[in-house]
Amino acid sequence: MKLNRRHFCKLGVGAATATVLAPYHIALASDGFLEIRAQKAEQSLYPDSPTSTLWTYNGTAPGPEIRVKQGERVKVRFINELEEPSSIHWHGIRIDNAMDGVSGLTQDAIEPGDSFEYDFVAPDAGTYWYHAHNKSWNQVGRGLYGPLIIEEPYLTFDIDHDITLVIDDWRINQNGQFDESSMGMMMDWSHGGRLGNWITVNGKSQQKLELTAGEAYRLRLINVSNARTLELDPNRFDAKVLAFDGQPLPEPIAMPYAPYLLSSAQRVDLLVIPRAGQNFALEEISGESPFPFLTFSVTGEGASSKPIPRLKTNPIPEPDLSNATVHPLLITGGAMGRFDGITYQGKPLERESMMQSKQFWAFNGVANLPEQQFFTAKRGETIVIEMVNDTAWPHAMHVHGHHFRIEEREGSTIDEGRPWKDTFLIGPSQTTKIAFVADNPGKWLLHCHMLEHAAAGMTTWFEVV
Ligand code: C2O
Ligand code: CU
């Protein structure tokens, strides 16, 4: 399997800022609307370096953490103070289609100066996120994202033991500022997407977080990178997996994969019980030496008598494989790939048009959102999508409005087991079958969440009627 190994910045951070992660700002939606403004703001991405102008929700990247209880309404008034149209997508939520926030499919993009009211019920507890869904490669890439936490309706981890970690991979320049000049680079679109050289957690660099030995913590990792698949090894600090992509496992388990690949848009909830005197770190391990991007210092003597909270699984319908409709999805294109038979806007994609339109990838021979849906499902029908990745690159495939199970894999070392997912990794030359019950009416996007790939062709849609 071929993933892009990282080359992170070595500007000499050393001991830099050993700030304790401040309690994360929580914006509780009551019966009123929570106002989320897309606006430019200055933020420092690298220790002791000048600020960068980011696009943010309410002045920071990530935007405010939205928390509601399972089954409650999320009510957000989105106000667009940017100079280009935008919309908000609620990633991983089995949502009312009209609220899915996909500009050009479920709604018109909200023009500068305009606003839109999102109002929906989140049926499943778990770790989700929200992000811009208009020119996502640009808007998410500049900071338009935030965590969306749907709390269990019963007692679990209290707020001091429930830690959201929004992880972003930035490409920064010599000054430690957002590298504006390489935005939209053809090379990124046709290869592995925009990969960065610096990692922030909750918008900050190289933080230190204090934990108490013996107490149980829930770490909610959210990878909001444009394209970076993070390689992690939570077994190094004896973490257990509570949930993938927001969906709790029946039992917490040791991470079965090493390295564990956390692709763009994926989430993992980890259960960590720190041991006395054993500091640890979240490290990206794809390079020659591990790159620690968040350090935990452990205080106290350990041994807590409190029971470890348990999470209940969400009510997602199990696919009925004996009664499924199978839809093949062939992925082609990309650097070192094949382009024969690819059309874009009804015309064959040739070298010249490719460079002009920046279309490099295709689903079933069509680059980018086709007028005709990939398939139509009857509500309640089990759908199997058989994806064949005939490209030289891994992809982070995301289905809107549904969670699915991976039923079968062939031809690669990537393995994610069979938990519920809303985004999964498919390796080069790999075939993967996913299955879900199409129980949510509307028009749903299916795309690669490596955002440059999505913009460069890896986007289609299906309809549930
Ligand atoms: Cu995070 Cu179209 O999705
Ligand atoms: Cu991709």
Image: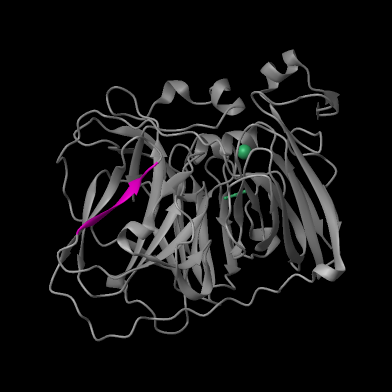
Majority secondary structure of the magenta segment? strand
Residue toward you, 465 or 416: 416
93 is higher (above) or lower (below) than 359: below
> In which quadrant of the rendered image does the N terminus lie?
top right
Image quadrant in which you'd find residue 103: top right
Report x, y in % for residue 288.
34, 35
> From which residue to which does the magenta span run?
279-285
Q: Position of residue 259 (x, y in %)?
A: 44, 50
The colour scheme applied to this rendered structure is one colour
Is residue 284 highlighted in magenta?
A: yes
Q: Position of residue 214 (x, y in %)?
A: 23, 75
For residue 304, side relative to residue 443 (left or right): left
Q: Is residue 292 above or below residue 317?
A: above
The quarter of the rendered structure image containing the C terminus is bottom right
Look at the image and tell me whether residue 349 can be seen. Answer: yes
At 64% from the left edge and 64% from the top edge, which residue is drawn?
A: 95
Q: Quick one: 447 or 463, which is closer to the camera?
A: 447
Whether the magenta-drawn stretch holds residue 30 is answered as no
At 40% from the left and 52% from the top, the residue drawn is 63
Q: Residue at x 79, y 58 (%)?
A: 384
